[in-house]
Image (cartoon, grey):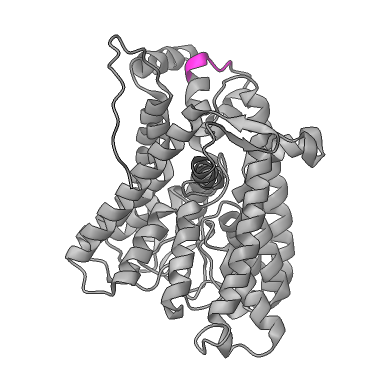
Amino acid sequence: MGWQDWQVRWRRSSIGINPPVLLMVLYAAIAALGGMALKLPFASTGAITWSDAIFTAVSAITVTGLVVVDTGSVYTSFGQGVIAVLIQLGGLGLMTFAALILSALGQPIGLGHRMVLRDDLNRTAVHDLLRLVRMIFLVVIVCETVGAIVLAFVFVPEFGWSHGLWTSVFHSISAFNNAGFSLFSNSLADYVANPVINLVVPVMFIAGGLGFVVWADIYRKRAFRTLSIHSKITIVGSAILIVTAWLLFALLEWSNPATLGGLEGIGAKIQGSWFQAVTPRTAGFNTLDTSSHTDSTALMTMVLMVIGGGSASTAGGIKVTTAVVLLLATIAFFNRQKELHIFGRSLGLETVLKVMALTTISVLVLILGIFLLTLGHDLPFIVLAFEVASAFGTVGMSMGATGELDTFGQLLIIAIMFLGRVGPLTVGFFLATQSTPRVRYPRGEIYLG
């Protein structure tokens, strides 16, 4: 069968399927294939269950990082390679890879494919998508290569050339894609005071979390004042969250003997608080014991995990722009303004309604997930709530609940991870559809507050 025949079949099979729904099916199919690959005898050092394999595959394709078995010791080099490929696919988007391959083969990409790609990249238009895809690929290659080279200066002297280079490559892929998978059982806790790890890894997941649209905008315009409103909100909002979380984490954990209080020297404490402040959005690595955080720190971390990173990025969460618009809408309400104003631009009612709908759905998913998880697990409430927030934000941090989950708990977290990564695409599609009402009703009044 020739290439044209495959294209015809693809077009026919795609008729009547909404692009976001098709993306969800693709992600689910890749997760299933990844689970089958991880279940192969030579993918692990011992026998693992199907639930372990599927959980790991979904965690990788959704770039979450929650694990039920130790990645470094349970999975062989082949298994770790499968996880790395899933992370790369999930972080950048399946349609990004498909469009890149088709473009390299000189094959035209039709409007239907561009619509799916548009939703995968969280864009509102289909023009100029291929240029964005090529730029994404270039940014990924450069960032992950540079990251792996720099990390090699830490890992190669410690583990030798073969294991050290693979460790560097794996953590570079995991960091840029905000996955949080590590080959060490305690994540990066052994490097809490290592300046290279504390600089390179956060820079990579912050860069991946800003979003490819922002980087494309920066590349084209080069000056902050000429950037789009989306880029300005993402950059400024991310900077405020990073600085605020850094200061709060240091304040809350400075005297905790199980975290910052157990480190020697102010330099180590500053580095530790810096890493733990930026990793919840939504990298998932940790250099301090997450289970030893105070309840106040855990709550702050949960908020950061739910917010996440930038739109059209490798990060999860409701996104920085959503959080900013929510705050602006609240301020506008108390100031009795009918429009939101920021950076010399106004945001209309439609934007606010979309943000409110997405946030409401996210809150409902979190509440339902926490409720169901508390039914069959005798663990502290904050631990279970933290697990659900981490899964929804595709972060991968845990206070120790992941290894204690039963089969129902694993399936629930799998569903939440999947919804956290690809669910908003479907929601966005239905929010984007417009219909003109045939009947108009008289305006009513209700009392609020």
Which residue lies at the image location 40% right of the left edge and 44% below the top edge? 359
Q: Is residue 111 magenta?
A: yes
Q: Which one is nearer the viewer's eye here, 408 or 98?
A: 408
Which residue lies at the image location 43% right of the left edge and 24% below the top edge? 432
Residue 39 can be seen, yes or no: no
Q: Is residue 429 above or below residue 83?
A: above
Horizontal and vertical percent position of residue 112: 47, 17
Asked which quadrant contains residue 229, the reply is top right
Q: Quadrant of the N terminus?
A: top left
Asked which quadrant contains residue 421, the reply is top left
Residue 410 can be seen, yes or no: yes
Q: Main secondary structure of the magenta part?
A: loop
228 with respect to 327 (left or right): right
Query: Which residue appears farthest toward the top when viewing the image?
Result: 438
Which residue lies at the image location 64% right of the left edge and 57% below the top edge? 240
Horizontal and vertical percent position of residue 61: 44, 48
Query: Which residue appears farthest toward the left when viewing the image?
Result: 376
Which residue lies at the image location 31% right of the left edge and 60% below the top edge? 52
Q: Which one is nearer the viewer's eye here, 408 or 277?
A: 277
Q: Is residue 5 magenta?
A: no
Q: Which one is nearer the viewer's eye here, 27 or 64?
A: 64
Horizontal and vertical percent position of residue 270: 67, 77
Number of marks present in the image shown: 0
292 with respect to 340 (left or right): left
Read off the magenta span.
Answer: 108-112
Q: Is residue 180 above or below residue 155?
A: above
Horizontal and vertical percent position of residue 294: 44, 79
205 with respect to 440 (left or right): right
Q: Which one is nearer the viewer's eye here, 120 or 49?
A: 120
